[in-house]
Image (spheres, helix red, strand yellow):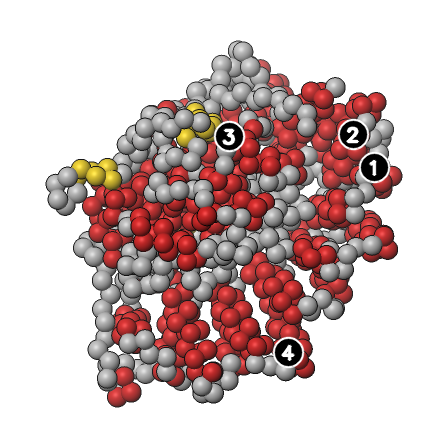
Amino acid sequence: MNPTPPDSYTSDPAWADLLPLPQDDGQHPLAQIAYTEEYTEAMSYLRAIMAKNEHSPRVLQVTAHIIEMNPAHYTIWLYRAKTLLALSAAGEVWLGRELEFLNDLALRHQKNYQIWNHRQTIVEAVAAAAAPAEQGRLVREEKEFMNIMFEHDGKNYHVWSYRQWLVRRFGAWDGELSFVAALLERDVRNNSAWNHRFFVVFGGTDAQQGGGEEVIEGEIRFIEDAVFIAPQNASAWNYLRGVLKKAQRPLSSVESMCLGYAPLDDPDKITSSHALDLLADIYAEKREEHGKAVKALELLAAKFDPIRANYWNYRVGLIKAAA
Amino acid sequence: MPQRPQVRSTRPKVIFTHNKMSATSPSSSVSSSKAPSNPTTRTPSTPSEVFNDILSSAQPPPTYSQQTWNPSNPYFPHYYSQNMSTTATSPPEPLIPPTPALFTTPPILHDTLQTPSSKDQISTAEICMKHLSNPSDPFPILSRREHIAFLEGGILGVQNGKLHQAMVALDASRPWIIYWCLQGLASLGVDVGKYRERVISSLRPLQNESGGFGGGNGQVSHVTASYAAVLALAAVGRGDDEDGEEGEALGIVDRRTMFHWLHEIKDWESGGFRVCVGGEEDVRGVYCALVILALLGLPTSGNLVKGTKEYLGRCQTYEGGFGATPNGNEAHGGYAFCTLAGLCILGEPAVVLRKHLDLDRLVSWLSARQHAPEGGLSGRTNKLVDGCYATWVGGCWALVEAGINGPQDENEEALGEKKVGGLRDKPGKGADHYHSNYILLGLTSAQNYFYYTSSPIPLSSPGGAGMGAGGY
């Protein structure tokens, strides 16, 4: 689908009908890039083809060539997508091949927005033409490829965003929880995985899985286990707060768990600054326990998390102002 | 909600007018550094205060090495307590103050379980501790001259007036290179007005007839390229145009077609903005569109921004930070800045920041972004520090502070410096124009006190860091 680019567009008869269009950089341009001849030539032929609004197979050739040299060239990607959709509608290309092209690029360019936006466009088009069973296979294959991406970087923002789009778009919630659990098994501090867990458990915004009492209990047990092996893991504690808020449970419902990691009366045994933080919030809710809240915050400022001393002192100020 | 304690700042003030093309205090007050506090009246009480005082006392030169060590100087209590006995018996020598222990020792709490995240964290912390413990140069003075040379190289080119061919990766981001370098130079006190003509002639071919700027000539209009172009034009300000008349460089922007194009990229269903027609939608799109509207004096209320405040508010996650979209993305420093800045353009900070988000969770999450011992800021929970978050996260503090006069940050950035000029993500990485600009902007946000006024102040000629502060 992406034939090898010619050694020279100028001397290739397949391109002879086009008059290459130069780039207008204006007078004395700033931040001008010393392009290679290869890039300059390919770009000037692409401009020529775009000026004709041509959507033919050779567009795929020149766009793939430029993307190889500069994968962040969004204009090229948009033109390629338009061409692919036109050719696919005419039955001249099979879009599945484009996904293979994207797999290779995504693995080589981890921090790129365009590849994933393009992938979304293509997958939408493939799905629109597919029977339900084929859609299922498409989603499965997409997830399999993302798993390979996550093996390289379990926190790749673009891949996670794409996964959330895919899961919601195709209602592909099945298996997501065990997938997240496996990632957390590998790295319990992978905050992206925790974030995805929240997305899955609470079904994004449409509360697809609701989160009944049983679900909440299960999540709290999961958090307890995670905190037990790494008490100083901020991801798990942030998630705990998120779950409690979503379930409309008071913070005080986890007081005893917090005390296990932050016994206020025995500061030498404190193993988690996050437990202290949570205790401070629990005790700040009741006036008669303000003293304990202040103590927790002072421990944080002086000893257990001094880089945030100003924040902890600010919280002490809030408590004193409320008194 | 309890009354928030008011925190008075001694940092230089940067005024900007809500929702108006920026007005700033005279650039001298913007670029001048905080005067060292009088050691006889105030003793720093927390490690971060000590750190901040050391940093602020270093500007302007003389440098530490030119100071004579005085054991009674309360600036350096760590050294004082450790070295009293030796300094009492030997004559005082010129010394560099030691780094507070917070930045030279691992955190007091650490789990025994090792995972990929904790291994990355430990190795980064070790590199930073090595730099911060370096007795000859723990907090290097900003190498102003070298950074100026590096950033000038970004716009003027390094070989035959051009950038190296490897920069082709930024061929769809040329307004960004120009903006990063100009803003970085302005932050260093360079008068960038001298580039006015060339900025105009460089950006003019990037503007499309149907509105907006592309990342290069002939490229589709993109909201981030348009944002960078508008900021670059604003940075070079007023001057004589080709026709001999004096005017704003921003005058080359076709406001009518720009306004029309912004309507094209608006997602009327969600309230968000796409980055280009057919492109991805996230809060970068919203933030860039709103900055363009504000700087061009186009309406930031009305139909075009219908549903946008709510869109931004929905991006807050259970952690307190903001994701790229309201669709469940992870909280991230860059998107947090875009969201907060966007809200502060759409409404009065004190109103919108309370109405559309959970401020307490936000402040908690933001304050957790600073790591010790590294001292730098991270963009997400359990991720590594990176110099550019000095702006993305540090800038959030300026907005939060401007809106509610809340807690002050203690951001600092000392690790990114390289001898040849240019600033970088973290030690071990290469310098680039992006990080150079955002680390300098982060320094600016840590050294200035930002607030807004409700009445417009006439536009003054841009200069120093003020324009950057006015930009958001």
Q: Disc 4 to disc 2, how far (Cα)?
A: 51 Å
Q: Earlier in the sequence, mark 1 or mark 2?
A: 1
Residue drawn at 41 percent across, 58 percent down: B264
The answer to whether residue B279 is left or right of residue A126 is left
Three-letter code, disc 2: Glu
Label 1, residues with CA under 10 Å away: few <14, some 14-19, many ≥20: some
Q: Mark 1 points at which residue?
A: A252
Q: Distance between the residues labelled 3 and 4?
A: 50 Å
Which chain is indicated by disc 3? B
SS of the residue under disc 3: helix
The 10 Å Cα crowd at callout 4, few under 14, some 14 to 19, many 20 or more, is some
Q: Is mark 1 on a helix, strand or loop?
A: helix
In space, the residues marked 1 and 4 are separated at their CA atoms by: 46 Å
Point out the frontmost of discs 3 and 4: 4
Which residue, given by chain and number where applicable, does mark 4 sit on?
A: A135
Q: In the image, what residue type sits under mark 1?
A: Ser
Label 2 Cα crowd, 10 Å radius (few <14 / some 14-19 / many 20+): some
State the residue in front, B426 or A156.
A156
Earlier in the chain: of badge 4 and badge 2, it is 4
Q: Type of residue at label 3? A: Ala
Q: What element carries label 2?
A: loop
Name which residue lies at 43% across and 57% down: B265
On residue A285, the disc is 2
**Residue B324, x across and y down, in percent:** 55, 53
Q: Which amino acid does label 4 sit on?
A: Gln
Mark 1 touches mark 2? (CB < 8 Å): yes
Q: Mark 3 points at which residue?
A: B402
Q: Mark 1, chain letter?
A: A
Residue B449 appearing in the image: yes
